[in-house]
Image: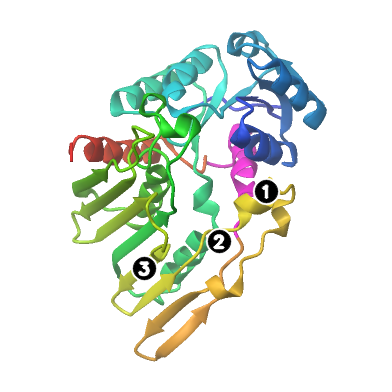
């Protein structure tokens, strides 16, 4: 358990690249009951930009934010390879911590982070915003209403074309499909299928000479209760697979397209996100075929939950047990060596 706060949480975002700027600071600033207290960046230009954007404090070094007694929460919008070291340092300094996904690079790092959180009695959690995508909320609703019956087989894909640049295209920084997109799809699969994992298979390709990260990552997760999840991430797909293809005992669901919140958020108004009806899913049962309107997604809910969790009014959306389960699958996939 962690110690809760008695005041509005004051949050500092570490990193002011695209995701720190367009996502974390944006969502925190518009969450009632949270205070965007500051931004950490080694770039003077980015610090100046953050001050202009949010009228908040800035820090040139991570250690400066840790030394500030007014800072309650550290959010890490930094390369994946830095998450473990920065999280442990922040927890030991008495700060609550949110890491962007992927949580870290392996189980040893994960366990060190969890140990630091428990020793410091501080909240440690992971930014799994894709739990609040409209398509995934729609899938969960299909399951809760029984429309699919007993879901036995789930295929999820996330695909595009072209090698990634920046740190996401560098293995040493924790880039690549498995850590990035895989962290989202594995988390969703484990929520759909809570039974223990029996086996993990992973196949990766390295087809782009300009990067040492994978061009393809295919993961098959077999669960002890007989269910199966197939996760397909690609940067060589000019034509993409369905985002969701689900087979249950009462019907089959298929849906294309990605949640529109990221683009709307980048444009400065996430509330304007609206899915094209052409991307609505299709459900087919013995009674016939029907289009399924997508439930609107709401990433804002992540930081609303964080606020409530820090104030002792809710459980964190992503628990340590759930975060570690994702890392167990990632480690099993990495250890395949194929």
Residue 246 shows up from this direction: yes
Which residue is at the far front?
209
Identify the residue under disc 3: 245
First to last magenta residue range: 297-315
Where disc 2 sits, the SS reads helix
Q: Residue at x 52, y 59 (%)?
A: 258
Q: Is residue 305 left or right of residue 153?
A: right
Q: Residue 299 at what x, y percent from top left? A: 61, 49
Q: Residue at x 63, y 8 (%)?
A: 67
Crowd band around label 3 with a 10 angstrom C-alpha radius: few (<14), some (14–19), many (20+): some
Q: Quadrant of residue 192?
A: bottom left
Tell which circle, 1 or 2, labels the residue nearer the N-terminal end.
2
Q: Residue at x 67, y 48 (%)?
A: 265
Crowd band around label 2 with a 10 angstrom C-alpha radius: few (<14), some (14–19), many (20+): many
Instruction: Between label 2 and label 3, give the one nearer the viewer.
Output: 3
Mark carried by residue 134? 2
Whether label 2 touches label 3, CB < 8 Å: no
Q: Is residue 77 above or below residue 196?
A: above
Where disc 1 sits, the SS reads helix
Q: Is residue 135 magenta?
A: no
Identify the residue under disc 1: 265
Crowd band around label 1 with a 10 angstrom C-alpha radius: few (<14), some (14–19), many (20+): some
Q: Is residue 158 left or right of residue 199?
A: right
Whether label 1 touches label 3, CB < 8 Å: no
Tell which circle, 2 or 3, labels the residue nearer the N-terminal end.
2
Q: Residue 163 at what x, y percent from top left? A: 42, 42
Between the C-alphas of marks 2 and 3, the distance is 15 Å
Residue 103 shows up from this direction: no
* Depth check, front residue: 211 or 68: 211
Q: Residue 337 at what x, y percent from top left? A: 18, 36
Between the C-alphas of marks 1 and 2, the distance is 14 Å
């Amino acid at each position: 358990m962690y110690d809760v706060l008695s005041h509005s949480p004051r949050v500092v975002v570490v990193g002011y690249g695209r995701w720190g700027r367009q996502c974390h600071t944006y969502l925190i600033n518009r969450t009632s009951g949270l205070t965007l207290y500051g931004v950490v960046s080694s770039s003077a230009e980015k610090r100046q930009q953050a001050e202009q954007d949010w009228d908040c404090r800035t820090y040139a070094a991570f250690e400066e934010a840790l030394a500030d007694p007014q800072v309650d929460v550290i959010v890490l919008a930094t390369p994946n390879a830095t998450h473990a070291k920065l999280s442990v340092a922040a927890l030991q300094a008495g700060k609550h911590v949110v890491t962007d996904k992927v949580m870290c690079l392996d189980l040893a790092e994960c366990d060190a982070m969890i140990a630091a959180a428990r020793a410091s009695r501080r909240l440690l959690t992971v930014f799994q915003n894709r739990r609040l995508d409209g398509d995934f909320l729609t899938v969960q609703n299909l399951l809760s209403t029984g429309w699919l019956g007993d879901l036995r087989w789930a295929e999820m894909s996330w695909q595009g074309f072209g090698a990634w640049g920046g740190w996401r295209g560098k293995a040493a920084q924790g880039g690549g499909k498995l850590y990035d997109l895989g962290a989202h799809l594995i988390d969703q699969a484990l929520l759909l299928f809570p039974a223990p994992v029996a086996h993990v298979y992973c196949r990766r390709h390295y087809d782009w000479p300009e990067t040492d990260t994978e061009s393809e990552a295919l993961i098959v997760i077999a669960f002890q209760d007989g269910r199966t999840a197939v996760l397909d991430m690609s940067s060589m797909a000019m034509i993409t697979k369905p985002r969701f293809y689900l087979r249950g005992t009462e019907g089959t669901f298929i849906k294309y397209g990605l949640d529109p919140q990221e683009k709307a958020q980048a444009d400065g108004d996430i509330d304007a996100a609206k899915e094209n009806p052409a991307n609505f899913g299709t459900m087919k049962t013995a009674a016939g075929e029907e289009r399924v309107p997508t439930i609107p997604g709401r990433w804002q809910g992540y930081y609303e939950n964080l606020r409530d969790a820090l104030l002792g009014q809710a459980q964190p959306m992503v628990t340590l047990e759930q975060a570690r389960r994702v890392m167990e699958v990632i480690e099993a996939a990495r250890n395949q060596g194929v």
